Image (tube, rainbow, N blue to C red):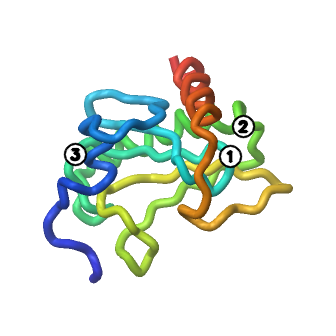
Amino acid sequence: MDLPTQYDRQNIIAKIIRGEIPNHTVYEDDQILSFMDIMPQTNGHLLIVTKRETISLLDADPEDLTNLIKKAQKIAQIMQVYFKADGILLRQSTGEIAGQTIFHLHFHLIPMKNDEKIKHHATEMADAELLAKQATDLRQLLN
């Protein structure tokens, strides 16, 4: 298996959770953080992460997984309406061979439209003002 055996506290998600790297927060509580992806595959692409130091699906605490999927469902329901999406792609990669590039457990929520092609991951930066507006709007809708 191509997974690290020790959690890297310097990965980008860990730095975002600690507030060392700014983000466009959609939702946050004691256990979960959700934020806009700055290199989205479609308009509205966001991440939802556990705050616990967790490498992948394989070493995750089952309670964390329960919390993540419950919050992912709630956020996806709001996203589908807000982005007028025809569907929501929920993506999670475990291991480099599966496409995991950041070794911190995270789910991608990607709004999909019938007439829109999904971009390759991490290829194009989104407009920061647009991401800020979307995060603010989604936060308000989640309350």
Mark 3, Cα crowd under 10 Å, few <14 / some 14-19 / many 20+, is: some
Q: Give the crowd class for mark 1: few <14, some 14-19, many >=20 residues within 10 Å.
A: many
| Figure quadrant of the N terminus | bottom left
Residue 52, which numbered label? 3
Q: CA distance from mark 3 to mark 2?
A: 29 Å
In three-dimensional space, the C-alpha distance between marks 2 and 1, rounded to whole angstroms, equals 8 Å
**Picture disc at residue 14:** none
Mark identifier at residue 43: 1
Disc 2 marks which amino acid? Answer: Phe
Mark 2 residue crowding within 10 angstroms, few (<14) / some (14–19) / many (20+): some
Q: Position of residue 51 (x, y in %)?
A: 26, 42
Q: Residue at x 30, y 63 (%)?
A: 103
Toward which corner of the image does residue 69 lie, by quadrant?
top left
Q: Residue at x 52, y 59 (%)?
A: 91
Which quadrant would residue 48 be assigned to in this image?
Answer: top left
- The numbered disc on residue 83 is 2
Secondary structure under badge 2?
loop
Q: Where residue 67 sits: x, y (%)? A: 35, 39
Which is closer to the viewer, label 1 or label 3?
A: 1
Mark 1 belongs to which amino acid?
Answer: Asn
